[in-house]
């Protein structure tokens, strides 16, 4: 039933900013599956060959600690050495996934950070015929493996509670966000480090980086899930209220990252040992206090060649995010490095299944390039007193990154091939609201050596009518599955061999 990869020679659509324009000849569409969409940036032509896989983890799935697995699409990565092409044309492997801060519809909870492993089989579907929703799930089959709970120094558990307090800097670690020691929680013998994890990047030695929204900080964990390093951002990004650093996410600070708009994006350039982190939208001083002015966000680069000695900030650039027709910022939930100063950026609205309305108008894996953009690190813009884009107006003399429309998740023809849709009705086949993660794996097709699968997953916010949070049952009033989509893309900027294979790099 599910045919293997067949050449995709199709109607070519040209992507210009947010609009795709059909070139001409509709008769060029034969029996092929997808309409290819191309975008040119930095001398490369990138191609979206369409959706080839769909899968889900059900909203009520319980992981090994007994909690609802929830929110796993906040951050995903393909585990090194697991991606394996099979002789029948399928691909198997394992994802490392990371939820954010637990079920928090009724306020934040004392949720210990944890990563999960999920194995998968991808059977790329490239025909034009529409599969029904149950058959579509055969194209990307997911199976839960296990869970690792994460701890900080001394084996102390972390928390998902709002960081109402701060622990002062000590023994090589900067001051960090902590839960309020006054809160009447029995387990809270000391104020625990609080994490709201949104990005993951894996190292060759089994250690891994996580980015968070509370700090917004970047943490390095060893393979066993213990924090071994903490990176604090520049002063311009640290949240400050009434003259003091204050990490609460309940109110926007006076300067620094806006509440719940931290380091959503995290990615590594393995060839240069550079770790990149990007804010979801502008800092408060750069227009981040209003969705109509929050589109100039910041991308930071750290040198992680010898991370335990230091991970110095080596670059910072301004990235212009897309805007909706009403002028609101389509904030960015993830980035992925593509080589040559080029990145994928997952920018979107909050509409769709589990979101603010049924019909979404923007969910895209776009492209941006920092080639030719101004590096502002080490300048006055490191300080909050010097905005780069007060009220959304970019300071003269700063050249922002070049941003370009690319993969549209909402293409109705593509969604229909997998039994999915955008807009009413609000049921399990409605595309999820909050897509937040990106991972790449090589297709390994000798005819198309620059082709990769792009895997993306949604964060369902733990929304289940049969949920369990910290061992206590809850009913969130709706069942939102954790959805996964897989696209086939041509990405010529990616240095060949730099994306991990079954041999691993
Ligand atoms: C989906 O399609 C397959 C093949 O046509 C069919 O056997 C199956 O019953 C359908 N499932 C649903 C839920 O409609
Ligand atoms: C999860 O499974 C992987 C692969 O079997 C294993 O390496 C890892 O130690 C397991 N982790 C836990 C916490 O069981
Ligand atoms: C942070 O700001 C909030 C809101 O203004 C306030 O309630 C809280 O006490 C502040 N926390 C610290 C540690 O100053
Ligand atoms: C891309 O980067 C590689 C090195 O990483 C370099 O060899 C190549 O010339 C670059 N290509 C372009 C078009 O800049
Ligand atoms: C979403 O779809 C449902 C039907 O499934 C409908 O009852 C509801 O009114 C729709 N919501 C909006 C905002 O259109």
Image (cartoon, helix red, strand yellow):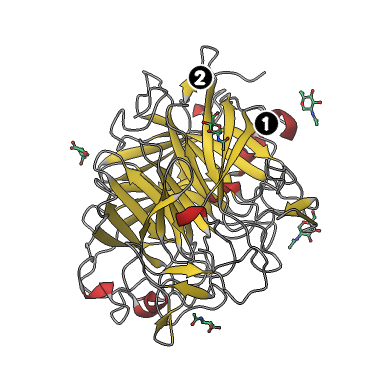
Instruction: Report whether the residue tagged 2 is closer than 8 Å to ligand 1.
Output: no
Around disc 2, counting alpha carbons within 10 Å, would you say few (fewer than 14), some (14 to 19), or many (20 or more)?
few
Around disc 1, counting alpha carbons within 10 Å, would you say few (fewer than 14), some (14 to 19), or many (20 or more)?
many
Circle 2 SS class: loop
Residue at 53% in and 36% down? 95
Marks 1 and 2 sit apart, C-alpha to C-alpha, by 18 Å
Q: Nearer the viewer, mark 1 or mark 2?
A: 1
Q: Quadrant of the C terminus?
A: top left
Q: Residue 356: x, y in percent?
A: 67, 63
Q: Quadrant of ligand 4?
A: top left
Residue 491, by quadrant, is top left
- With 13 as the anchor, is 370 left or right in this view? left
Q: Residue 411: x, y in percent?
A: 57, 44
- With 18 as the anchor, is 304 left or right in this view? left
Find the residue positioned furthest to the bottom: 242
Is there any visible trace of residue 17 in the rendered image? no
Residue that label 1 marks: 136
Upstream in sequence: badge 1 or badge 2 = 2
Find the residue positioned furthest to the top: 87
Residue 13, by quadrant, is top left
Instruction: Report whether the residue tagged 1 is closer than 8 Å to ligand 1.
Output: no
- In the figure, 441 relative to 39: above or below? above
Residue at 63% in and 32% down? 142
Residue 446, by quadrant, is top left
- With 283 as the anchor, is 398 left or right in this view? left
- In the figure, 491 relative to 379: above or below? above
Residue that label 2 marks: 6
- In the figure, 390 relative to 403: above or below? below
Circle 1 SS class: helix
Residue at 53% in and 56% down? 156
Q: Does the residue at mark 1 contact the one at mark 2 (Cβ under 8 Å)?
A: no
């Amino acid at each position: 039933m599910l045919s293997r990869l067949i050449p995709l020679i199709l109607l070519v659509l040209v992507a210009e900013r947010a609009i795709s324009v059909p070139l001409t000849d509709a008769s060029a569409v034969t029996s092929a599956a997808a309409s290819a969409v191309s975008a040119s940036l930095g001398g490369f032509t990138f191609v979206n060959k369409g959706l080839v896989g769909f899968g889900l983890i059900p909203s009520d799935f319980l992981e090994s600690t007994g909690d609802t697995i929830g929110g796993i699409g906040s951050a995903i990565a393909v585990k090194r050495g697991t991606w394996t092409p099979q002789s029948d044309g399928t691909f198997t492997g394992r994802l490392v996934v990371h939820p954010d801060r637990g079920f928090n519809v009724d306020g934040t909870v004392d949720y210990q950070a944890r990563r999960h492993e999920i194995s998968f089989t991808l059977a790329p579907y490239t025909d034009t015929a529409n599969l029904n929703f149950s058959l579509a799930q055969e194209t990307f089959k997911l199976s839960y493996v296990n869970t690792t709970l994460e701890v900080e120094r001394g084996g102390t558990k972390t928390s998902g509670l709002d960081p109402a307090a701060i622990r002062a800097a000590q023994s090589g670690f900067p001051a960090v966000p902590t839960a309020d020691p006054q809160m009447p929680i029995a387990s809270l013998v000391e104020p625990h480090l609080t994490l709201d994890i949104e990005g993951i990047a894996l190292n060759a030695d089994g250690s891994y980086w996580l980015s968070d929204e509370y700090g917004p900080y970047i943490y390095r964990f060893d393979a066993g899930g213990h924090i071994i390093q903490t990176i604090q951002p520049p002063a311009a990004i640290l949240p400050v209220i009434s003259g003091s650093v204050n990490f609460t996410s309940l109110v926007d600070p006076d300067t620094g990252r806006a509440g719940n708009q931290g380091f959503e994006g995290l990615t590594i350039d393995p060839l240069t040992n550079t770790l990149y982190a990007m804010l979801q939208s502008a800092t408060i001083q750069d227009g981040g206090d209003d969705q109509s002015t929050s589109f100039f966000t910041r991308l930071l680069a750290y040198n992680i060649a010898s991370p335990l000695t230091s991970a110095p900030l080596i670059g910072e650039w301004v990235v212009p995010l897309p805007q909706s027709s009403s002028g609101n910022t389509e904030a960015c939930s993830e980035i992925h490095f593509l080589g040559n100063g080029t990145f994928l950026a997952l920018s979107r609205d909050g509409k769709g299944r589990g979101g603010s309305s049924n019909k979404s108008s923007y969910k895209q894996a776009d492209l941006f390039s920092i080639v030719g953009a101004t590096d502002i690190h080490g300048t006055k813009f490191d300080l909050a007193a010097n905005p780069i884009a007060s009220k959304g107006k970019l300071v003269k003399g700063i050249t922002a990154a070049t941003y370009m429309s690319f993969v549209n998740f909402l293409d109705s023809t593509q969604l229909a091939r997998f039994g999915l849709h955008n807009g009413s009705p609000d049921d399990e086949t409605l595309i999820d609201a909050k897509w937040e993660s990106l991972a790449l794996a090589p297709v390994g097709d000798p005819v198309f050596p620059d082709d990769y699968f792009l895997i993306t997953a949604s964060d369902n916010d733990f929304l289940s009518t049969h949920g369990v949070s910290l061992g206590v049952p809850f009913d969130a009033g709706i069942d939102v599955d954790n959805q996964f989509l897989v696209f086939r893309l041509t990405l010529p900027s990616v240095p060949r061999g730099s994306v991990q294979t079954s041999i691993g790099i």
